Amino acid sequence: MGYLEEFDKESANSEINCKNQDDPIMKRSPDEKINFNPPSESPLCTFCTSDESCKIVRSRTKLMNILVEKGKHQEAQSVFNDLIRRGHKPSLVTYTTLLASLTVQKRFEHTHAIISQVHKSGIEPDSVFFNAVVNAFSEGGDMEGAMKMFSKMKEYGMKPTISTFNTLIKGYGIAGKPEESLKIMEIMSMEENVKPNLRTYNVLVRAWCNKKNINEAWGIVHKMVASDIKPDAITYNTLVTAYVQNGKTEEAENVILEMRKNNVQPNERTCGMIIAGYCKEGRIRDALRFAYKMKEFGLRPNLVVFNSLIKGFLDVSDRNGVDEVLTLMEESGVKPDVITFSTIMNAWSAAGYMIKCQEIFDDMVKSGIKPDIHAYSILAKGYIRVQEPEKAEEILSAMQKRSDLYPNVVIFTTVISGYCSIGSMTSAMRVFGKMIEYGISPNLRTFETLIEGYAEAKKPWKAEEIVQLMEGFDVRPEKSTFLLVKEAWRAVGLTQETREDGLEKFSSFSRLQIPNVVLSEQKRNNNRKVLREAVESSFACRFGERPPVVSRRNFRGWISCQVGSFCTVLY
């Protein structure tokens, strides 16, 4: 066990002990500590202490594996903690499963502790455990630890597999040292029955691309071909992604020539990345050109691509481009969704044409597509922008009538800001009260919006009372908050010296007149726990059914007409 003693010394401070654990399935905090030692008062399992096979350990380990496969890592971790709490001794498979789960969660701080526990338990590690440890160190970028464990693995007569080598190559890529991977390739060449495979080369290509050295990445591709290993779509998509991320979408498109030369067909992901790259570079016409080119590959643009194209053409006020995209969209049999409508709504809203924005919203509803919270927010912000907060408030009422969608703190604060901007603080506080009544907890931005409103209304004493109100909602003022209050006093001509006199002058004023619902809510929730629980339960937004078929008359024809008018106005 000497190979583990070295790690045991390094990890002396890595063990984490936990006592009095709750039920393993009920406690699922991602920060839950790992319990390696049972409580002193807990009796030990007689089967485990006698080194006999324990059925409970076997069954719980199987359960951990099932939970890990389903991505329920916190639950698997809780099952492990429960085993320890009940006095059981985990098996090597148990520790391996735990390590794999923690690696997926990137909780690498526990790796040394698990190695130490295996050593202390007197368990003889196998190749599966070794590979899990190598992977944990590699994923964490600790290649010194990974290589040390790799060497010990070989010392104990265990032959590394191609998966082991691929993991090490991946680790050097994560550590930003792809050049070190060449050494791994040399070691691999000296092993019997172990040769680089497609994944090996793909990992190397990704490592060089992540370091923005695309020339070296191409060198790896050429080595692949020379080794009679055919690059696949993953290989080329990695290169395409690298070019796009570096603002070289035209070169990314040229990768397709190489793909077709090697009989590799571009897929939807390849084309989507190139179109997204052209849109990002503002080359919308090139993006549309490539969308037509997809037919050559037996592909057609998806909804994400069409929405990106529509947004791109709207951004440059190209009405012909938008109409062309809508036509292609219909010809491709792709149905618009809430994002399609919202994108066009947002263009009208940003330009201040709320009548058109509302018409598109109404047309979306008539088409059977349920607006999401983003669509409602576009409407609300638009009405605030044109100083019509009453209509923005109507949006809240419309949302409250739905059982599958709830207003959140952002949209409430937006409406509040609208009333503040026109100096109607009574209405702003009324909406604030409605917000609390609805179970939504205000945040820092909400309170600072109210402070700014009272500052504009020349009522700094009320701005200061808003700061006092924040305490009742567990929101801590920041430096920006106090600066806003300071500016509010300065706006009414009070200097730092006269401020105290000003405060005394207004001390006879009653507490800030908050709607009764706010005050009564605060009285009921003195410990503020109920309010927070209400917020957590009502904050989530759920989406409706998939959009039904929308006819050309209802969608493309009507909207393209609207967009045409919009673009004409901008010209």
Image: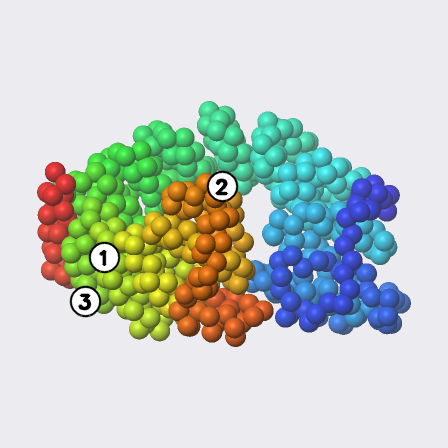
342 lies left or right of 98? left
**Which numbered disc flags the more N-terminal residue, 1 or 3?**
3
425 lies left or right of 148? left
**SS assignment at label 3:** helix
Occupied quadrant, residue 413: bottom left
Residue at mark 3: 366
Amino acid carrying mark 3 in the image: Lys
**SS assignment at label 2:** helix
Occupied quadrant, residue 397: bottom left
Residue at mark 2: 496
401 lies left or right of 13? left
Image depth: mark 3 or mark 2 in front: 2
Amino acid carrying mark 2 in the image: Gln
Q: Is residue 373 in view from this perspective?
A: no
Image depth: mark 1 or mark 3 in front: 1
**Which numbered disc flags the more N-terminal residue, 1 or 2?**
1
Q: Position of residue 370 (x, y in %)?
A: 28, 65
Residue contact at pointers 3 and 2, CB within 8 angstroms = no
Q: Position of residue 24 (x, y in %)?
A: 68, 69
User: How many residues crowd mark 1 within 10 Å: few (<14), some (14–19), many (20+)?
Assistant: some
Q: Between 305 and 476, which is closer to the camera in this rendering?
A: 476
Q: Looking at the rendered structure, which numbered label has been put on residue 388?
A: 1
Name the residue: 34% across, 32% down.
Answer: 249
> Which residue reaches farthest right?
50
Spatial distance from mark 3 to mark 2, Cα to Cα?
A: 58 Å
